């Protein structure tokens, strides 16, 4: 080949290769230096900070910071983050259990604190939280006075919260509760060698400490500690016991301060929601044991369960019914002017509360108001009163074919109503030879066995209890299903009136499908 032509071909190939290398990929993004975004450049320190027992790692504390986290620091940060997560989950679980009326004593204490907890997640707040009846910390501890095992369990739960907390005010709250819980446990134990000193101080404690403020108690604490550390000839047992009691009163004062802050926070929430309730709460003395009844009323609910524990029921044994429609779950805290508060009724009520709850039982307070009830003929002779009651609803799972297919014991189906236990107290009945009766009322012309409810719902009816003077009629809304009247022990049908108590216990028939 002609050398000139060969040189020309070689030159063209070289230019084509250079053009191919410089050609931009049409699928690649177009580069524009004016719109370019890049990470800020930083230069790490030439001398990274190291721990005494560890070596630096490649993680920097931040752009431009120039600090490396050591292994010890990383471990500490990991533990702190883990504790923070565990505390957050514990508070969230407590809130859920309180809202679902299955709370333990520790859950009520944690729920009370959420109104002033600055570390809480605001996305977990519910508008109805302020309406939930929660016993005050002092009342809750009083309800556990005679139960050492529950006090011990509560004390361990309180210590767990106190260990995980980092907020100063929250730690003071849990520390005060731990001291009070420990004091109540010690009072349940038999007196030992220190019994003499305790008995000697007991008469002086209330006189000295009860009227003191928190600041005055702190001053007294310093004086007593200085006296114990001095070389003066003093009765050491007396002053040590006095100091121990002072710490209890100091814890009560701190707890009272926190409760006042909780009350103020609840008042602020209620001012926008219900000014009348906010004013009533603000004028009340201390933190109430339950949410105040709503003046605006609320929608009716069939089942209003609360925590299934005797201690919770004892803490809430104020009244059991209301003529107005209270918020869900608060009917047993609302009192009326014509309710029966006689000593005999209170004794029967407290005895029934002390029985506690069996598995699957919850408090039932779905009372219906009888607005069209005419005035009884004996109203001029006897003061009409509404009977008190302590009713239970039986909740459980139905393991039919559908539920067996779609659920298991780890993921159970929704609970359904399986029966009721009515306990209504008539201790002051004038004519004790006539037992109170009950009758079923179905609205809308519906007859027994008929169903007007939509698919997936159950029909309801009213069960009305009728007694003679001086008691008014009382009614409850229940699920309308066929009753099981069998005498089997596990079915538990009972209808009796004895010693002033009307007891009606029944369960619904279980339906079995055969091929």
Image (cartoon, rainbow, N blue to C red):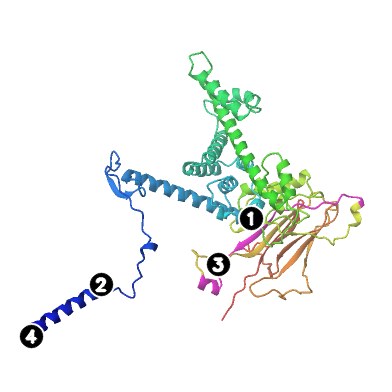
Question: Mark 4 to mark 1: distance in Å?
Answer: 94 Å
2 or 4: mark nearer the eye = 4
Q: CA distance from mark 3 to mark 2?
A: 67 Å
Q: Which residue is mark 1?
A: 127
| Horizontal side, residue 373 vs residue 440: left or right | right
Which label is found at residue 413? 3
x, y percentage for residue 254? Answer: 59, 35
The residue stretch that appears in magenta: 380-406
Q: 289 and 496: which one is in front?
A: 289
Q: Which circle's residue, 2 or 4, is located before the other in the chain?
A: 4
Which of disc 3 and disc 4 is earlier in sequence? 4
Q: Is residue 234 left or right of residue 451?
A: left
Asked if the magenta segment contains residue 154, the reply would be no
- Of the two numbered discs 1 and 3 on the same chain, state the one appearing first in sequence: 1
| SS for callout 1 | helix
Which residue in the protein does label 4 denote?
Answer: 2
């Amino acid at each position: 080949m002609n050398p000139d032509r060969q040189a020309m071909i070689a030159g063209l190939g070289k230019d084509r290769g250079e053009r191919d290398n410089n050609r931009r990929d049409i699928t690649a993004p177009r580069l524009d230096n004016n719109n370019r975004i890049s990470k800020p450049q930083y230069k790490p320190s030439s001398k990274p900070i190291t721990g005494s027992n560890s070596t630096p790692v490649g993680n920097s504390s931040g752009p431009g910071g120039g600090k490396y986290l050591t292994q010890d620091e990383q471990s500490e940060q990991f533990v702190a983050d883990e504790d923070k997560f565990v505390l957050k989950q514990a508070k969230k679980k407590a809130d859920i259990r309180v809202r679902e009326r299955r709370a333990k004593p520790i859950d009520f204490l944690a729920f009370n604190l959420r109104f002033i907890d600055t570390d809480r997640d605001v996305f977990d707040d519910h508008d109805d939280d302020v309406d939930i009846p929660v016993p005050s910390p002092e009342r809750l501890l009083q309800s556990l006075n005679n139960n050492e095992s529950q006090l011990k369990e509560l004390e361990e739960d309180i210590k767990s919260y106190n260990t995980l907390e980092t907020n100063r005010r929250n730690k003071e709250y849990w520390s005060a509760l731990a001291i009070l819980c420990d004091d109540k446990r010690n009072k349940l134990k038999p007196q030992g060698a220190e019994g003499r000193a305790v008995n000697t101080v007991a008469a002086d404690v209330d006189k000295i400490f009860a009227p003191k403020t928190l600041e005055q108690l702190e001053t007294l604490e310093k004086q007593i500690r200085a006296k114990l550390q001095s070389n003066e000839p003093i009765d050491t047992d007396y002053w040590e016991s006095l100091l121990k009691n002072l710490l209890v009163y100091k814890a009560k004062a701190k707890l009272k301060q926190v409760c006042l802050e909780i009350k103020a926070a609840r008042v602020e929430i209620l001012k926008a929601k219900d000014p009348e309730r906010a004013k009533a709460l603000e004028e009340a003395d201390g933190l109430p044991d339950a949410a105040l009844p709503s003046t605006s009323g609320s929608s009716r609910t069939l089942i209003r369960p609360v925590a299934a524990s005797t201690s919770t029921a004892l803490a809430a044994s104020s009244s059991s019914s209301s003529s107005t429609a209270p918020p869900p779950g608060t009917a047993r805290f609302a009192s009326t002017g014509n309710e029966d508060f006689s000593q005999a009724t209170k004794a029967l009520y407290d005895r029934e509360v002390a029985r506690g709850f069996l598995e699957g039982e919850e408090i039932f307070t779905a009372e219906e108001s009888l607005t069209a009830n005419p005035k009884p003929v004996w109203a001029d002779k006897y003061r009409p009163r509404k009977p008190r009651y302590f009713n239970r609803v039986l909740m459980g799972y139905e393991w039919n074919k559908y539920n067996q297919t779609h659920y298991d014991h780890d993921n159970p189906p929704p609970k359904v109503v399986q029966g009721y236990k009515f306990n209504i107290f008539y201790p002051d009945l004038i004519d004790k030879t006539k037992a109170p009766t009950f009758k079923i009322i179905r609205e809308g012309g519906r007859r027994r066995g008929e169903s007007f409810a939509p698919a997936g719902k159950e029909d309801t009816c009213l069960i009305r209890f009728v007694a003679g003077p001086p008691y008014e009629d009382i009614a409850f809304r229940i699920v309308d299903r066929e009753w099981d009247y069998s005498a089997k022990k596990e079915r538990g049908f009972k209808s009796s009136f004895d010693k002033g108590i009307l007891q009606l216990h029944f369960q619904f028939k279980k339906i079995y499908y055969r091929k």
